[in-house]
């Protein structure tokens, strides 16, 4: 089966069929428009999206009256950073930006993929954080730029 469009997301669709198959993906794979995957029931799929759209946790790739195939993002090793002041937020955002590390923001938390150097920096700056496995809603994206 070749998947060319995303039907919707389980968070926004009005109803789902009684049975759901999952395609487990690392967040890095969410940005790939063309890939081969296997569901948790062993069904092989080819994904070849017509639009340049990233996949997201909960995206429905295929659905009929009895079954749906849904993307499920695997948990990642993250640093969950919770600065207590604007100064702390500025300091850590500046340092992470200088390292060209992508970050995501959810409900007052800054999420970055685990890096022991960032963890050491957080300890040195006394910025509250915790290391945890968590699903992210979208891929961490590196944004390229140049120093001219």
Image (cartoon, rainbow, N blue to C red):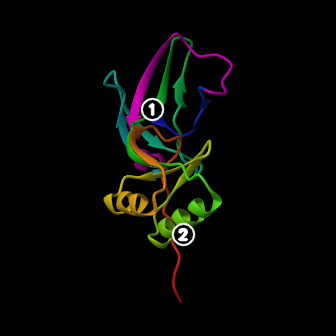
Above or below, 139 against 93 in this view is above
Image coords of residue 88 (percent x, y) = 56, 61
Is residue 3 within the magenta segment?
no
Which region is colored magenta? 11-30
Q: Are marks 2 and 1 in contact (CB under 8 Å)?
A: no
Query: Which residue is under mark 1?
Result: 72
Dot 2: few (<14), some (14–19), or many (≥20) neighbours within 10 Å? few
Residue occupying image coordinates x 32% and y 58% = 116
Q: Which disc is residue 105 wearing? A: none
Question: Quick one: 57 or 99, which is closer to the camera?
Answer: 99
Whole-Å distance between the Cαs marked 2 and 1? 32 Å
Q: Which mark is residue 94?
A: 2
Q: Is 19 within the magenta?
A: yes
Q: Nearer the viewer, residue 115 or 39?
A: 115
Q: Depth check: 40 or 143 in front?
A: 143
**Residue 71: percent from left, percent from top:** 47, 32
The percent position of residue 11, horizontal first and vertical second, equals 62, 27
Question: Residue at the location (59% across, 16% down)?
Answer: 16
Q: Secondary structure at mark 1?
A: strand
Name which residue lies at 41% across and 47% down.
Answer: 78
């Amino acid at each position: 089966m070749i998947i060319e469009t995303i039907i919707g997301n389980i968070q926004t669709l009005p109803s789902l069929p009684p049975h759901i198959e999952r395609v487990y993906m690392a967040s890095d794979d969410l940005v790939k428009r063309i890939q081969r995957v296997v569901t948790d029931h062993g069904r092989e799929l080819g994904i070849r999206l017509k639009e340049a759209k990233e996949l997201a946790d909960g995206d429905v790739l295929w659905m009929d009256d009895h079954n749906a195939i849904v993307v499920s993002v695997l948990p990642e090793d993250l640093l969950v950073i919770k600065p207590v002041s604007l100064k702390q937020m500025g300091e850590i955002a500046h340092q992470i930006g200088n390292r060209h590390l992508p970050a995501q923001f959810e409900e007052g938390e800054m999420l970055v993929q685990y890096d022991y150097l960032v963890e050491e920096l957080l300890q040195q700056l006394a910025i509250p954080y915790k290391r945890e496995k968590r699903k992210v809603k979208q891929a961490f994206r590196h944004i390229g730029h140049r120093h001219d």
